[in-house]
Image (cartoon, helix red, strand yellow):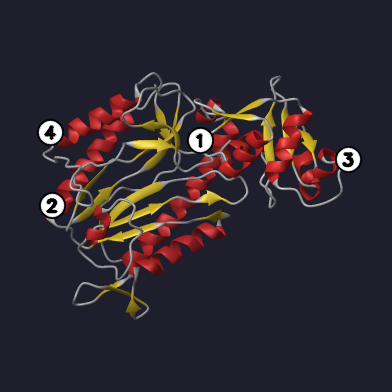
Amino acid sequence: MEENDVRYATGLVATDPFGVLVDARGRLHLAISALEAARARQTCPRAILHTPAELFADAAPRRRTLGAQMLALAKKLRVRAVQAGPYFPLGIARELERGGVKVKLAEAPAFPQRAVKTPSEIARIAKSQRAAIAALRAAVRALREADVSPSGVLKRNGKIFLAEDLRALIERELFARGCTAEGTIVAVGPQGARPHDVGSGPLRAGVPIVLDIFPRDKTTGYWGDVTRTVVRGRASDQVRRMHRAVRGAQRLALAMVRPGVESRAVQLAVEDYFRKAGFETKLSPPGRESGFIHSVGHGVGLDVHESPGLRHEPGRIAAGHVLTVEPGLYYPGVGGVRIEDTVVVTKTGCRILATFPKNLELSAG
């Protein structure tokens, strides 16, 4: 299982590594250290716990690798073959196979039900999303309050205002709300043409600044995800046209997201919308891609990118899915415009979990 499949199944996050095995009867077994056993019992009372002292009761006491523990557990349960996901550790797989336990690669997700969120999961994601919105609000306020130098560089408290400074401000806001953040994007001007460029250097007036904030709640492990693109002052005509098109594409996608709709139908509709609006997509040469170059959205939960997605893949949207809706346009030398909201699919459509304005231009505040 992947790390977050384990967390989904057990609710447990431990300092020491531990193993999970689901037997043919659907019972959950944990190979876990004695240091974590009491907490595991409390967190996951339905699991059957196996400590090294139990698994190696007849052997001399010594430190055992997790692979050795998993092999001992498999032999105890008389398991001759196991299914593992694509990210299963190779070292443990080889140790199992050396001990006579065949490891097969599972073709299906371990817990496909993860895609449909329970009400408690939706509440956890919404909490992270509210933290993201609060941090976004603080970031926009700081951009409004910054001074603009004659050269167009933003200054704050008399010093050049850097993307790194704004990222630190965002992450402090998230930390104060019980969230962690890694890779927060503050991409300035041409940096924004690379969708995952975190951004660096001086913030400037008159150019698009992509703010992509995706916090994870430190307690629950659930993520949020929001993006806005703003310009301090007046944007160029090209960036204004890009922003109008992205807003229109997002409105279209949000209107389509409802139970029963094919995921790829949303992707195709947005691609067609941009094409008709005059924004062609070019996927080569590598590093110089332009236009709408990614999927409309992805699932959000214990992973910030998880199934299902709004992309070129089979499958239908279902009530309880939590998805981002984030069309964008990217042009090297100019920058990027992306607008993203995280929504929960309802019985009749979708609902944005936490809202924030989608204005492009920021006046002085």
Which of the marked residues, 3 or 1, is nearer the chain's N terminus? 3
Q: CA distance from mark 3 to mark 1?
A: 34 Å
Disc number placed over residue 86 in the picture, else none: 1
Q: Tell which tag, 1 or 4, sits nearer the viewer.
A: 1
Q: Tell which tag, 2 or 3, sits nearer the viewer.
A: 3
Q: CA distance from mark 1 to mark 4?
A: 40 Å
Q: Where is mark 2, residue-wise?
A: 238
Q: Quadrant of residue 315?
A: top left
**Label 2 Cα crowd, 10 Å radius (few <14 / some 14-19 / many 20+):** few
Tell me the kind of residue under disc 2: Gln
Q: Where is mark 3, residue-wise?
A: 58
**One can see residue 18 in this view:** no
Picture layout, residue 267 above or below residue 217 = above
Which of the marked residues, 1 or 4, is nearer the chain's N terminus? 1
Residue at (25% x, 50% y) in the render? 337
**One can see residue 186 in this view:** yes
